[in-house]
């Protein structure tokens, strides 16, 4: 590399010097030969290394043919006279006046450079003109050798660099069997059990693992054996990986973490080799913890694949089973794994002696959500009006990751508005943004479309408010969000674990309330109810085929899952009943749907005037929630408006009184010298006026400010899945009923695109 640098530096210096030379002409070979033959060249230096000539010369005269001929004749005579002298001290001794030549015809000498190209010998040419000084410059021997071998040297350096890079990756190409686990011993995660909230039972289990590794003698003296493996099971976002990081932060022992997908790669046997190397390192560092995230990537059930070829993943799983069962007694190595698909894991992996404990990390309840919110609220400037317990009640079905995202979105929205603290307004708006997406304020709709959406959402809300077992309605909006043209938010009073048959039937009526409202109050039905119909049909079919809630078919389950985990969910169920039974199932589903439709139709037919009022209010305010929503549903809108107007008037009067009091106080302080003890009651009036408007604004928050709230959105909740097919009769703990966009493809399959199903 030094030689290359020296060569490039010399070339750069040469170019710099060439650029600095003044009045240098570049001649072609023929011009150079002509100048030599005409004796206009003073000296010639030939560089054998670059085949170039350089020196000084007189350019040819251009003042006419006669002048040029006279100049050339005089110049040749001068050179002939000079060549006859061996030692010439002065050109005057040869009978030539140099002053005459310099001042008349020779002009100014210039530097030149040219490339010697051709078959003729330069030496022979210069021998014919002995008056011209001729010098040959030969290249240096060392530099010539370096330049000749430079391409080979550069190629060798390139191959050495490539070999170094290849050996650097994975510490050589032969280390592909080494584990990729990251050991956290010195730089541990800055996470502790105090940072994990909402899963108290799981934290207790993991604290026991930490205590065993910290003080194993306590358990060994009493004859207890710590579980060799702990499997964290739960939905995504519930804190399984966070819990493992908390163990690493507090265990005080080496912690090896790896993903299930890091075992298997392109070479056969790599997975098993990495498993052996992982457990070897853990045993050498014992006591230690091994954490495998997403273990279902390597621990899926064996023998259910469709292909007949060699399965590298199965070999990796076999080696993992051997290593887990081959622990020495009290080896002080604990394996922790996390998955959200425990149903696809191999049974041999779950037996006692391997994963002795399965710790469920489930969706938190209302108290757990409040604790999680308190953890994520640390370090954020929260306003006094933000009530974490209220937010926890508004977010049934939210996981820990959802709650963390909610507060982060609130902080981002606060910063976007250049505020200093996070208020309840930002939290509620972020809640709707997380659930249904951002507002589509730029969407333009005609009056007929808005009217249809208003009646549609009013139908959902009124049916839900009328039926006793339906979830309470908290907000109605015709503001577009995501793919929903409007939505109605229903929040349960408490977290639900089980749902009764009557509750599910009433939920069906609420879902069909929007379509029924279009039938009664609009000229024609629209595609806005596509998602409602899809969800309602799914619930009705599950009532018949999975929950045994059909009086016609009895307590029988139809369509047993075949548990072939590699076939995927689409092929997971088989029709284990006859075509006649299938027809009866379809008839029963249709009967349940018609029953729910008739219930909604009866309710809305009786309350036509109230429906007209609700639709007109929605068209005017776009969003109603809180007291305004309750007044609409209770049909006490006139009383609410009177109260709203009185509150507005009182707030205006108090604001005016505050302004007058301040003016009087300012005038008194500037014009009259009043002692402090005899000052008028202006400060008292000011104090009252400062608190009274706050009360007025608070009372008017859900009333007069409803229009502002409609633009920003508030009171959003997170609905859970429509139905949990793995639990007994679990349905929505809260629901969003929306008007869908008119989209042909959306009509047939809207579950993956609607805001309601994005949860």
Image (cartoon, helix red, strand yellow):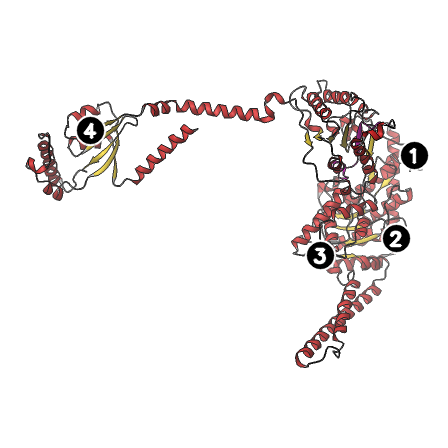
Which class describes the residues within 10 Å of circle 1: few (<14), some (14-19), or many (20+)? Answer: some
Earlier along the polypeptide chain: callout 3 or callout 4?
4
Residue 619, x across and y down, in percent: 75, 58
**Was residue 160 drawn as part of the magenta stretch in this picture?**
no
Magenta stretch: helix, strand or loop mostly: loop
Q: Quickly name the residue at label 3.
A: 711
Q: Quickly name the residue at label 1.
A: 553
Cα gap from disc 2 to disc 3, whole angstroms: 28 Å
Q: Is mark 4 on a helix, strand or loop?
A: strand
Cα gap from disc 3 to disc 4, whole angstroms: 93 Å
Q: Quickly name the residue at label 2.
A: 466
Cα gap from disc 1 to disc 4, whole angstroms: 118 Å
* Nearer-the-camera pick, 547 or 369: 369
Q: What element carries label 3?
A: helix
* Marks 3,1: beta carbons within 8 A: no
Which class describes the residues within 10 Å of circle 3: few (<14), some (14-19), or many (20+)? Answer: some
* Marks 1,2: beta carbons within 8 A: no
Indicate which label's residue lies in the foreground, 4 or 2.
4
Q: What stretch is highlighted in magenta?
A: 224-241
Residue 295, x across and y down, in percent: 74, 29
Earlier along the polypeptide chain: callout 3 or callout 1?
1
Earlier along the polypeptide chain: callout 4 or callout 2?
4
Screen quadrant of the N terminus = top left
Cα gap from disc 3 to disc 1, whole angstroms: 49 Å
The residue depicted at 69 percent of the width and 21 percent of the height is 273
């Amino acid at each position: 590399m030094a030689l290359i640098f020296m060569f490039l530096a010399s070339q750069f210096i040469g170019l710099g010097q060439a650029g600095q030379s003044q009045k240098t002409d570049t001649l072609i070979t023929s011009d150079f030969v002509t100048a030599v033959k005409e004796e206009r060249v003073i000296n010639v230096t030939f560089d054998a290394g670059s085949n170039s000539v350089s020196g000084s010369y007189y350019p040819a005269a251009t003042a006419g043919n006669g002048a040029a001929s006279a100049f050339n004749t005089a110049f040749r005579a001068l050179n002939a006279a000079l060549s006859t002298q061996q030692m010439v001290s002065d050109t005057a001794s040869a009978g030539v006046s140099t002053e005459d030549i310099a001042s008349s015809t020779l002009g100014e000498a210039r530097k030149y450079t040219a490339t010697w190209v051709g078959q003729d010998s330069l030496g022979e040419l210069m021998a014919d003109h002995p008056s011209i000084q001729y010098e040959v410059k030969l290249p240096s021997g060392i530099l010539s050798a370096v330049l000749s071998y430079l391409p080979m040297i550069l190629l060798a350096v390139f191959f050495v660099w490539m070999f170094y890079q290849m050996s650097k990756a994975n510490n050589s190409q032969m280390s592909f069997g080494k584990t990729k686990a990251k050991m956290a011993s010195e730089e541990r995660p800055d996470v502790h059990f105090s940072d994990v909230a909402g899963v108290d039972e799981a934290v207790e289990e993991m604290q026991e693992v930490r205590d065993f590794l910290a003080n194993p003698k306590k358990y060994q003296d009493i004859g207890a054996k710590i579980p060799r493996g702990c499997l964290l099971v739960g939905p995504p976002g519930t804190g399984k990986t966070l819990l493992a990081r908390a163990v690493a932060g507090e265990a005080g022992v080496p912690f090896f973490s790896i993903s299930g997908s890091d075992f298997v790669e392109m070479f056969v046997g790599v997975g098993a080799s990495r498993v052996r190397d992982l457990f070897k390192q853990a045993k050498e560092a014992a006591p230690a913890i091994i954490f495998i995230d997403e273990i279902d990537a390597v621990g899926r059930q064996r023998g259910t694949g469709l292909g007949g070829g060699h399965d590298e993943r199965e070999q990796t799983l076999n080696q993992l089973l051997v290593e887990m069962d081959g622990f020495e007694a009290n080896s002080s190595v604990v394996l922790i794994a996390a998955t959200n698909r425990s149903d696809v894991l191999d049974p041999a992996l779950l037996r006692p002696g391997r994963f002795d404990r399965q710790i469920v990390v489930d969706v938190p309840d209302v108290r757990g959500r409040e604790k999680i919110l308190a953890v994520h609220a640390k370090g954020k400037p929260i306003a006094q009006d933000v009530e974490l317990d209220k937010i926890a009640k508004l977010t049934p079905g939210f996981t820990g990751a959802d709650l963390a995202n909610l507060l982060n979105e609130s902080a981002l929205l606060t910063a976007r508005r250049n505020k200093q603290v996070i208020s309840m307004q930002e939290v509620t708006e972020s809640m709707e943004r997380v659930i249904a997406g951002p507002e589509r304020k730029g969407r333009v709709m005609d009056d007929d479309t808005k009217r249809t959406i208003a009646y549609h959402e009013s139908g959902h809300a009124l049916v839900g408010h009328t039926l006793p077992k339906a979830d309470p309605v908290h907000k109605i909006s015709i503001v577009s969000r995501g793919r929903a043209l409007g939505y109605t938010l229903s929040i349960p009073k408490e977290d639900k674990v089980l749902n009764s048959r009557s509750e599910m039937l009433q939920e069906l009526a609420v879902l069909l309330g929007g379509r029924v409202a279009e039938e009664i109050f609009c000229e024609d039905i629209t595609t806005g109810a596509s998602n409602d119909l899809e969800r309602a049909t799914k619930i009705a079919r599950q009532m018949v085929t999975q929950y045994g809630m059909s009086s016609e078919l009895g307590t029988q389950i139809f369509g047993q899952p075949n548990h072939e985990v590699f076939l995927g969910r689409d092929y997971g169920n088989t029709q284990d009943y006859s075509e006649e039974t299938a027809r009866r199932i379809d008839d029963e589903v249709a009967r349940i749907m018609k029953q729910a439709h008739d219930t909604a139709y009866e309710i809305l037919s009786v309350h036509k005037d109230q429906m007209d009022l609700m639709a007109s209010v929605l068209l005017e305010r776009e969003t109603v929630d809180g007291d305004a929503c309750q007044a609409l549903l209770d049909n006490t809108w006139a009383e609410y408006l009177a109260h709203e107007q009185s509150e507005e008037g009182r707030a205006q009067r108090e604001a005016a009184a505050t302004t007058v009091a301040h003016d009087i106080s300012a005038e008194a302080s500037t014009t009259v010298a009043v002692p402090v003890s005899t000052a008028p009651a202006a400060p008292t009036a000011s104090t009252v006026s400062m608190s009274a408007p706050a009360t007025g604004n608070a009372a008017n928050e859900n009333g007069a400010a409803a229009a502002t709230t409609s633009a920003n959105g508030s009171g959003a909740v997170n609905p859970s899945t429509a139905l949990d097919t793995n639990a007994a009769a679990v349905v929505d703990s809260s629901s969003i009923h929306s008007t869908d966009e008119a989209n042909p493809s959306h009509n047939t399959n809207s579950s993956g695109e609607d805001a309601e199903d994005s949860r």
